[in-house]
Image: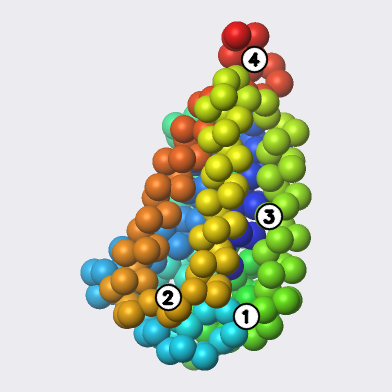
Amino acid sequence: MFLGHYGLAFGAKKYAPCVSLGTLFLAAQFLDLLWPTFVLLGIETVRVVPGITKVTPLDFEFYPFSHSLLAVLCWSLLLGFLHYRLRKNRTSAFVVGFLVLSHWFLDLLVHRPDLPILIRGNSFVGFDAWSSYSLSLFLELSIFLPGILIYEKTTSAIDDKGKWGFRSLVMLMLFVHFGNTFGPPPPGSTAVAWVGEMQWLLVAWGYWVDRHRTTQGDPRRSRP
Ligand SMILES: [Zn+2]
C-alpha cells in the first residue's frame, strides 16, 4: 500500500492539529522508511519477481524487523513515547503511535500472506488485495481521497506555497502510485531500496507544506 498510508496521515491532522504533516507522514510510513535502509544494509531481503502479484512485483522474502506485528508494536510505542517526551501532548503522541501501528494493518489488506507476526516463526498473514488491480486501487483511493479532503478542510494555506505545495504533493503521490503500478518492474532489490529511500523527500515536503498552512486557532492564521 502507498496512497492509503499517506491518506491516513493527511486525515490524522484533524485529530492532531499541532503535529506537522511531515511528522504524520513519518509515522504512517515509518515501516516503509526503515525497510529500504534495512534492505541496503542486508538486514532484510526482497526479490523482484514480475507477476508475483498483479500490482507489485516485489517478493518480500524477509522483513520481520520492519514489518512483523511484534516489531511494529514496539516501533509504535517507541515513536509515541518519543513524541510525548518532545511535545508533552498525549493526544498527539497517541496519534503518532497509532499511525505507526496502522501501517501494518493497511499492509495486511493488500499483501500476500507474507507479513510476519513474530520476528522468527512461520506465521504469516495477508489478505492479498494486490491480486486485483481494481480492489487495491479502490482500497488505496478510499483512504487517500477522504484523507486529503480532511487535511484541506482542517488547514488553510497561508500563502501560495501552502496552496500549490499541497496540490503538487497530492499530484506527485498519485503519479508515483500509478507509475509503480503500471510502470516496468525495477531492475533489482537495490534499485527498489533506493526508490524507497526517496520517500524521505515526501516527508520533507510534508514539513514544508505544513509550514505554509495553518489550522484553526493557530496564531499564523491572521498573517497576511
Ligand atoms: Zn509497508
For marks 2 and 1, the one nearer the N-term is 2
The mark found on residue 144 in the picture is 3
Q: CA distance from mark 1 to mark 4?
A: 42 Å
SS under mark 2: helix
- Is residue 88 visible in the rendered structure shown here? no
Camera-near label (2 vs 3) is 3
Q: Residue at x 75, y 50 (%)?
A: 146
Residue 194 or residue 95, whichever sits in front? 194
For marks 4 and 3, the one nearer the N-term is 3
Q: Which amino acid, by three-letter code, is at mark 4?
A: Arg
The residue where tag 4 is placed is: 221
SS under mark 3: helix
Tell me residue 181's x, y (percent): 55, 73
Tell me: 67 left or right of 93: left
Tell me residue 129's x, y (percent): 67, 80
SS under mark 1: helix
Camera-near label (2 vs 4) is 4
Does the beta carbon of the residue at mark 4 sit less than 8 Å from ligand 1?
no
The residue where tag 1 is placed is: 130
Q: CA distance from mark 2 to mark 4?
A: 44 Å
Q: Which amino acid, by three-letter code, is at mark 2?
A: Pro
For the residue carrying disc 4, how many other residues have a C-alpha within 10 Å: few (<14), some (14-19), or many (20+)?
A: some
The residue where tag 2 is placed is: 64
For the residue carrying disc 1, how many other residues have a C-alpha within 10 Å: few (<14), some (14-19), or many (20+)?
A: many
Q: Which amino acid, by three-letter code, is at mark 1?
A: Trp
Q: CA distance from mark 2 to mark 1?
A: 20 Å
Tell me residue 170's x, y (percent): 59, 47
